[in-house]
Amino acid sequence: MAGLDDIDLTDLDRFANGFPHELFTRLRHERPVWFHAPTVHTPGGEGFWVLTRHADITAVANHAAAFSSHTGGGRAGGGTLIEDLPSGFAAGVLLNMMDDPRHRHIRRLAAPALSPRTLHELEDELRARTAAILDDVLARGRCDFLVDVAAELPLQAIAKLLGVPQADRHQLFGWANATLDYDDRDLGAQSDKAAAAGAAMFEYGGRLLAEKRRAPAADMLSAIAHGTVPGEGGSPAVMTELEQQMFFNLLVFAGSETTRNSIAVGVLALIERPAQWTRLQRERALLPSAVEEMLRWASSTPYNRRTATRDRTIGDAAIKAGDKLTLWWASANRDEALFAEPFRFDIARTPNPHLAFGIGSHFCLGATLARLEIRVVLDALLDRCAGIALDGPLEWTRSNKHSGVRHMPVRLTAR
């Protein structure tokens, strides 16, 4: 379509200063189901569909049989990234790149560790950890909010839940950053730094899983190492070692990266709107709606891909079996059809049907944990800080898959 040719969603420089909402507003209005032709930046030289409206995205995400998280249409690969990942190594093995019924069975193994009851029992410990984190940064008066606060509680929490020694959490943080960030590479490419980090995490996870198999403990990784799911013929069998390893990697990434960015970008929104910060200090009953607005505003996972398993029609677009479709959650979360004044940050917004955690069978397994962590950090900040201000330039990640910041220098004033 004339006028859209200059939009290249595989050029990561477009995302180097945050999510390019202006491009997606244009797509929602002009071509909500748009075929993105391949460019020099597009992995595999293959185009894909771009869905930008809440209603279309919800419909596709809720129809897992027609739109697979694994593969479809005779593809050798697939997955939830724009680029095809090999089936049997990533696609079809990672939980988020797997279809039911195996996807459902594996989720059930992990669900008890992330249930509301289990996390309610963990809340006092999370509050104590947050108090210690803030005591340290308030004593200094300045910090990198992303590294020292927003990332720190999720790291400590996921280490505890997985059964990772707390002393190793920053090592995992460094490996996850190097693997997920595209500061030195483009889509479909690998850098020496990312490859080394991925290999180191794989080796670490393998050693930790072997330990859990020998001596299980009361943690999620032990449940994964020993739990059974229906195997061939329906008989119970433990997950393959590769599935266990990929599960470990996924939980490290998802348990630390997305929540820290929702906290950081959400707090940035409050820094830029001091009246809302003051109101939230005065009206703590608004904390739940403030957390939901932070999630909508940050939209830390901008998109996920699906693959059509059969021919379908969406709007006036004819989708063929095997076509790639990208579901842009971040665009859905600014859809004018669902959200009044979508570019206004409002701690009292209700209803707030955001898709920050996705929707359907792949709704985020850790949503309850993420909400709890955001609420605990925000509550503690409101209690302990009279104010927060930026203390230098914000540095965004260069990625179309993970919206967030690398560094966020701030000054904090204790109450």
Image (cartoon, helix red, strand yellow):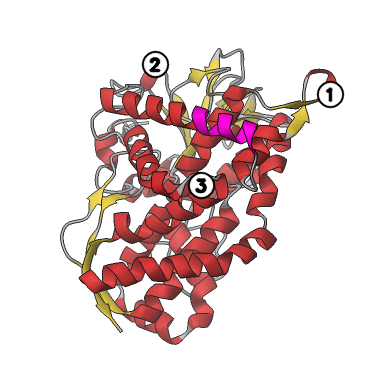
Rendering coords of residue 202 (x, y %): 45, 27
Rendering coords of residue 92 (x, y %): 60, 24
Sequence order check: which comes first, mark 1 or mark 2? 2
Which of these two is toward me, 360 or 146?
A: 146
Q: Is residue 72 above or below residue 266?
A: above
Do the CB atoms of the residues marked 1 and 2 lie less than 8 Å apart? no
Residue at point 53% right, 17% down? 77
Sequence order check: which comes first, mark 3 or mark 2? 2
Tell me the residue that label 3 is attached to.
53
Give the mark count.
3
Q: Determine whether the residue tagged by mark 3 lies in a helix, strand or loop.
A: loop
Magenta span has 411?
no
Tell me the residue that label 2 is attached to.
44
Q: Determine whether the residue tagged by mark 2 lies in a helix, strand or loop.
A: helix
Specify the amino acid type for callout 1.
Answer: Ser
Question: What is the number of the mark on residue 376?
Answer: none
For mark 1, does the 10 Å Cα neighbourhood hold few (<14), some (14 to 19), or many (20 or more) residues?
A: few
Residue 14 seen anywhere in this rendered image of the structure = yes
Q: Is residue 50 left or right of residue 237?
A: left
Residue at point 45% right, 74% down? 379
For mark 3, does the 10 Å Cα neighbourhood hold few (<14), some (14 to 19), or many (20 or more) residues?
A: many
Which of these two is toward me, 217 or 390?
A: 217
Specify the amino acid type for callout 3.
Answer: Arg
Tell me the residue that label 1 is attached to.
235
Which contiguous range is marked in magenta? 206-215
Do the CB atoms of the residues marked 3 and 1 lie less than 8 Å apart? no
Residue 375 seen anywhere in this rendered image of the structure = no
| Helix, strand or loop for the magenta stretch, by majority | helix
